[in-house]
Image (cartoon, rainbow, N blue to C red):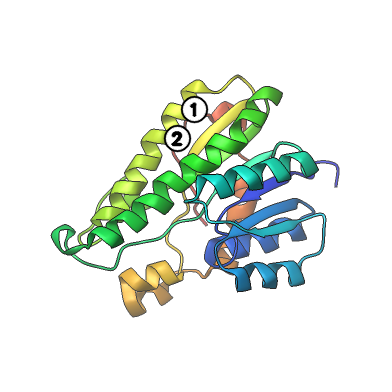
Amino acid sequence: MSDAKVVVLTGATRGLGRAMAARLIEDGHTVVGCGRSLSGIKDLQASFAGPSRFDCVDVTDDGQVAEWAESVIAELGPPDLLLNNAATVNPNAPVWEVSAEDFDAVINVNIKGVANVLRHFVPSMVARRRGIIVNFSSGWGRSTSPEVGPYCATKWAIEGLTQSLAQELPDGMAAIPLNPGIINTEMLQSCFGSGAAHYPNPDEWSRYAVPYILSIRPSQNGQSLSVTP
């Protein structure tokens, strides 16, 4: 397809990431995905042939992200679309009962992981003065609920980080904090239990979400957007 894009996607091995990868490839785009699960990466590699590529990368490890980005840019050039999707949530608990280990895990993936990916992919995009950056936020990046305080804190941080980044980009680019909506994923199940089944699954969500994401334009730079059916 003439408007085929190179899409970098974190958290590609499950949930929204896996569904977006499948939909984007089906639409003719090249997906460069990563995840921490080696078995998940091998499944993606077996399911989708080149030019898309999938690599085992821990986004919380800046060195791993740097090596990955260098390899990707050398092979495919700067991404047209950068989707910072990888995230985790704390076990349901009041803030004072969340262990330091669990709190650190959420901060490391949801904030530091995003910063690591931006650090190593965005310079090549800026040099070309082209590309869309979508950092996945949440309804809990604009509101709060009990027992998910660490997760809320990280998604509020993503809103601020992304809007600041938007002010730093040259014309022709955009950075967007995106609320994907409520989707029946493993993370939602951990928070909502059986109530998660009332919401669309990742495959259903991707059918309207991917076209919406692909429609984002530089003129929307800095806007807090939401995916709706």
Number of marks in picture:
2
**Residue 86 at x, y percent in the picture:** 50, 55
Residue 147 seen in the current view: yes
Q: Mark 2: give few (<14), some (14-19) or many (20+) Cα within 10 Å.
A: many
Q: Mark 1: give few (<14), some (14-19) or many (20+) Cα within 10 Å.
A: many
Residue 136 seen in the current view: no
Residue under the image location 60 percent in, 33 percent down: 122
Q: Is residue 156 left or right of residue 110?
A: left
Specify the quadrant of the image occupied by residue 148: bottom left
Residue under the image location 65 percent in, 33 percent down: 131
Amino acid tagged 2: Thr
Specify the quadrant of the image occupied by residue 217: top right
Amino acid tagged 1: Ala
Q: Report the disc number at residue 109.
A: none
| Image: 89 above or below 72 | below
Q: Is residue 138 left or right of residue 217?
A: left
* Mark 1 lies on residue: 166
**Residue 2 at x, y percent in the picture:** 85, 42
Q: Residue furthest front?
A: 63
* Mark 2 lies on residue: 162
